[in-house]
Image (cartoon, grey):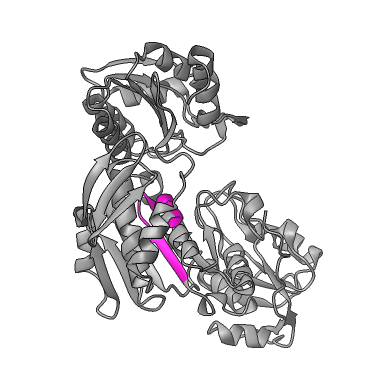
């Protein structure tokens, strides 16, 4: 946990705060605003309370509670008449982001913030880039999927249990803490975060695109909508520089549609030449340098090239980049090899059809003669269209498939598994909804030299079934059960 205290916001008269965000202040413009909140139970005296409308909740309904807690003003989309000044706007989320930035002193303008977006690879690219920067002597703060609540300077103030990109208020507080600590910031930016205006008031030094493949269509409806959401990051008002991986058609399209006043550089897996890919390390040549990477496979090379290209845009030397990539540690749950013998066990976060296919391909590259036993499921209350596509991806590349629960939430796990099975045509498969039992089955099926791939949850440590959130960590369970069979791994 970081030790620094949460930085206070500066107090501003409502008139001045509104002027900073381009709004007309209400008549009570002299009211002093000393903080900002979007959660009624976390309001402190002097806050402006932001009435955010979400998918499940409308904070306008909690404005009275916020006023009773001490809110000095309201940012809202309709007049509520609760006896405090109201700033009525069309889009609370957008103005909230800019108000939070103003109250925290526009921190993104005082340090370098690097954004990474895409369907797959965000977390690994962020980790690689942060390590390169640290090895070059730059203090760095990372924000993203692996930023657990107790590693943040401030708790996430949204109602969501976890967010790849923090809500706008928490994000500005984190950026302010980074400025105070003299840190650069490398962060993941999700499509949800873009549409929900969480980064609307952030100035980025460089914005990075990794790739795009089917995911989140329960939220975006179509791939076109998903692409347009990602495209929002590449806005000349917030950045002047982009690094685009063109290994997918969406990367090329992003380049073709890039605003003229954003400079960009492209990269691709083909920029590197692999010279060794084993279960121990990966070696490749990039920019004439031989680089040794502790992460494995072609996906690791692709992510390394993206991180290295970004580091070049930030002005780092080839020496710094080589040293940084050589120091990269295993990213939790990202093609994480738990043991190598007698059976290799790999845990990966792959939860989209393309990610699963690429992860299985990596397994095949590292051990061409191995049978691959794949254990995975699909999340409930999420994109249903990808389920048979996940089955199809595994059908092409796995030797044996075991379908199991992966956060089924409110849906019956059996129904989800059957929908995945619709994509399986000629590969042996079974359904075992208890995830521990599924892992045990995979280990019992595997023969020496085989690979067991446990996909979908990666670093996650819980399993949501109905309304229950149960402790479950693929890595811990796989280690426990494999030790029962083969003893401790070497």
Q: Residue 380's spot in the image, x, y percent?
A: 46, 33
Q: Residue at x 29, y 29 (%)?
A: 388
Residue 83 location, x and y as percent? 76, 74
Is any atom of residue 213 visible in this view?
Answer: no
Q: Nearer the viewer, residue 267 or 143?
A: 267
The magenta stretch spans residue 220: no
Res 404 visible: yes
- Please give left or right for residue 454 compared with residue 5 in the image: left
Figure disc tally: 0
The part of the image, by quadrant, that contains residue 393 is top left
Q: Is residue 372 above or below residue 255?
A: above
Q: Residue at x 53, y 48 (%)?
A: 146
Q: Which of the 4 image quadrants contains residue 29?
A: bottom right
Point 66% across, 56% down: residue? 155
Q: Residue at x 69, y 75 (%)?
A: 9
> Which segment is the magenta one?
113-127
- Above or below, 401 relative to 363: above
Q: Is residue 483 left or right of residue 350?
A: right
Q: Point out residue 185 in the picture as x, y percentages from the top left corner.
A: 51, 66
Image height of 257 relative to 451, above or below: below
- Between 440 and 389, the one lying in front of the other is 440
| Residue 114 covered by magenta stretch | yes
Q: Position of residue 232 (x, y in %)?
A: 36, 66
């Amino acid at each position: 946990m970081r030790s620094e205290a949460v930085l206070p916001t500066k107090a501003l008269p409502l008139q001045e705060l509104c002027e900073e965000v381009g709004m007309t202040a209400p008549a009570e413009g002299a009211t002093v605003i000393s903080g900002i909140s979007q959660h009624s139970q976390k309001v402190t005296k002097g806050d402006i309370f932001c009435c955010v409308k979400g998918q499940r909740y409308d904070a306008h309904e909690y404005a009275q509670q916020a006023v009773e807690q001490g809110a000095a003003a309201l940012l809202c989309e309709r007049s509520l008449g609760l006896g405090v000044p109201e700033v009525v706007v069309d889009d609370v989320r957008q103005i909230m982001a800019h108000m939070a930035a103003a109250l925290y002193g526009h921190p993104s303008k005082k340090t370098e913030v690097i954004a990474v977006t895409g369907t797959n690879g965000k977390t690994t690219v962020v980790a690689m880039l942060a390590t390169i920067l640290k090895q070059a002597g730059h203090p760095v703060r990372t924000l993203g999927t692996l930023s657990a609540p107790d590693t943040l300077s401030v708790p996430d103030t949204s109602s969501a249990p976890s967010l790849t990109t923090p809500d706008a208020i928490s994000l500005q507080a984190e950026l302010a803490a980074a400025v105070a600590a003299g840190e650069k910031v490398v962060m993941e930016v999700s499509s949800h975060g873009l549409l929900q205006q969480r980064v609307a008031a952030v100035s980025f030094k460089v914005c990075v695109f990794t790739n795009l493949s089917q995911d989140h269509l329960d939220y975006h409806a179509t791939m076109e909508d998903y692409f347009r959401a990602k495209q929002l990051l590449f806005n000349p008002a917030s950045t002047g520089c982009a690094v685009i991986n063109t290994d997918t058609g969406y990367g090329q399209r992003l380049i073709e549609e890039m605003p003229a006043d954003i400079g960009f550089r492209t990269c691709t897996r083909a920029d590197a030449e692999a010279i060794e890919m084993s279960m121990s390390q990966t070696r490749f040549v990039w920019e004439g340098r031989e680089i040794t990477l502790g992460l494995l496979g072609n996906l690791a090379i692709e992510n390394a090239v993206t991180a290295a290209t970004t580091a070049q845009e930030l002005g780092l030397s080839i020496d710094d980049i080589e040293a940084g990539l050589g120091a990269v540690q295993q990213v939790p749950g990202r093609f994480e090899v738990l043991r190598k013998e007698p059976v290799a066990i790999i845990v990966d976060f792959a939860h989209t059809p393309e990610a699963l296919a690429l992860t299985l391909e990596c397994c095949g590259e590292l051990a061409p003669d191995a049978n691959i036993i794949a254990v995975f499921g699909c999340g409930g209350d999420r994109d249903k269209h990808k389920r048979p596509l996940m089955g199809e991806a595994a059908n092409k590349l796995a030797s044996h498939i075991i379908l199991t629960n992966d956060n089924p939430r409110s849906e019956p796990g059996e129904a989800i598994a059957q929908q995945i099975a619709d994509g399986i045509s000629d590969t042996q498969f079974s359904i075992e909804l208890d995830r521990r039992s599924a892992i045990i089955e995979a280990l019992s099926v595997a023969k020496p030299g085989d690979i067991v791939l446990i996909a979908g949850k990666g670093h996650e440590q819980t399993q949501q079934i109905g309304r229950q959130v149960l402790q479950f960590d693929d890595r811990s369970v796989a280690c426990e059960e494999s030790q029962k069979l083969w003893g401790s791994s070497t």
